[in-house]
Image (tube, rainbow, N blue to C red):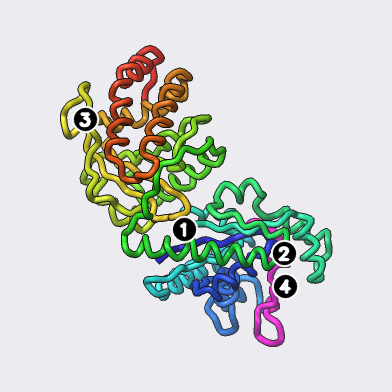
Amino acid sequence: MLRVGLSGGIGSGKSTVAERLRALGAVIVDADALAREVVAPGSRGLAELIERFGRDIVGADGALDRPALAAKAFVDDESRAALNAITHPKIAELTARRMAEAPADSVLVHDIPLLVEAGYAPEYQLVIIVHAPEDVRVARLTERGLAETDARARIAAQATEPQRREVADVWLDNSGDVDDLLARVDRLWDERLVPFEENVRLGLRPPQRSPRLVDPDPEWPAQARRLLARVERAAGERAVRVDHIGSTAVPGLPTEDVIDLQLTARTLADADALAEPLAEAGFVVCPDVTADAPHEFAPEPQQWAKRLHVSADPGRRANLHLRVGGTASWRVALLFPAWLRADAAARADYLEVKRRLVAEHAEDPHSEDRAAAEEAWFAANLPNALAWAERTGWRP
């Protein structure tokens, strides 16, 4: 199963995207619909609201009068907290039940307006944000009968565009033609969501690609933060720390579009125990990788042991290295990006080597010779990196 979070500000067109995904075959869990269901006539939720706020919050038809409830529940923090204490646990329980009922091979889309505000993004393997400029959203809302001042007030009360961009794996701009939006949703379904779900369910990594250097992407740090947040949530207390490592952690360095992350574990047993929760978070295990190549300064094999997981997302290549804190391989993985960030000459030399190796092995995504040649550069330059660390006082 693939768990997708879908959100967007009021008037953005989120519901249009949700309905398209439903038509394509996704299982939709609608947070707004569940919020209404837990306070439906005859429900325990409605009974508790009546007990707390009075019977006059119910209309003549026996249904909740939402404006009447709002007039009482949003007068102060205590009343708002009471409302949340009644409704939120019931919504969470019903959400978990509906998700558990979905078939094992589902693309499950949680349509939730407050995904960003509630900090839920790390709970999903992918987050889709639907966006449109404020003026476009205001125009849509006023066409529905909302006063412009009310429309702008509601928009201002929600998450900002930068906050939404920070959590968005997929950013769907809905400022133009709806047919264009639906076409992009169709491509997203076919090219990313369906294969991502299959990879997660079957424990498969996306097909490897031939090497290609790209210009530095200013989005790499934000993409790494999203992945790290999912790793942290999945690993819990077994993660001592998680870091963005590798070439994409070096600003300004052209490299392959693959994000490398490192999870620091206390023991290899802890690392092995994380195989299942990390796979459920979208990082499938590579059982054939159990160690890095040793170096002369620490030849003991246990100093280079690791576990490797790979993102199952075909739209965002990423490697997750699990290493034991304090080992040689753990320290080197943190040292090299720090040294390359600080040393322009080292960066230039490394880039020259990468360009040469990519050109030599451009048609071979599985080249062991290329990997060995790059590893040889690291081994040859490890004394320089260690000397820099000693000179500057760098510590992991």
Residue type at mark 1: give it.
Answer: Tyr
Tell me the SS state at disc 4. helix
Checking the image for residue 68, the label placed there is: 4
The residue range painted magenta reads 56-77
Q: Which residue ends up furthest to the bottom in the rendered image?
A: 61
Residue labelled with disc 3: 294
Q: Residue at x 52, y 71 (%)?
A: 29
Residue labelled with disc 2: 177
The label nearer to you, 2 versus 1, is 2
Mark 3 nearby-residue class (10 Å; few <14, some 14–19, many ≥20): some
Mark 4 nearby-residue class (10 Å; few <14, some 14–19, many ≥20): some
Q: Earlier in the sequence, mark 2 or mark 3?
A: 2
Distance from Cα at disc 1 to Cα at disc 3: 36 Å
The image shows residue 53 at horizontal and vertical percentages of: 65, 71
The label nearer to you, 1 versus 3, is 3
Q: Residue at x 73, y 71 (%)?
A: 67
Distance from Cα at disc 4 to Cα at disc 2: 38 Å
Q: Earlier in the sequence, mark 1 or mark 3?
A: 1
- The image shows residue 150, relative to residue 33, as above or below, that is above
* Relative side of 213 to 40, left or right: left
Tell me the SS state at disc 2. loop
Q: For residue 394, what is the image quadrant?
A: top left
Residue type at mark 2: give it.
Answer: Asp
> The C terminus is located in which quarter?
top left
Tell me the SS state at disc 3. loop
Q: Earlier in the sequence, mark 4 or mark 2?
A: 4
* Relative side of 89 to 307, left or right: right
Checking the image for residue 124, the label placed there is: 1
The image shows residue 371 at horizontal and vertical percentages of: 30, 36
The answer to whether the residue labelled 4 contacts the one labelled 3, judged by CB atoms less than 8 Å apart, is no
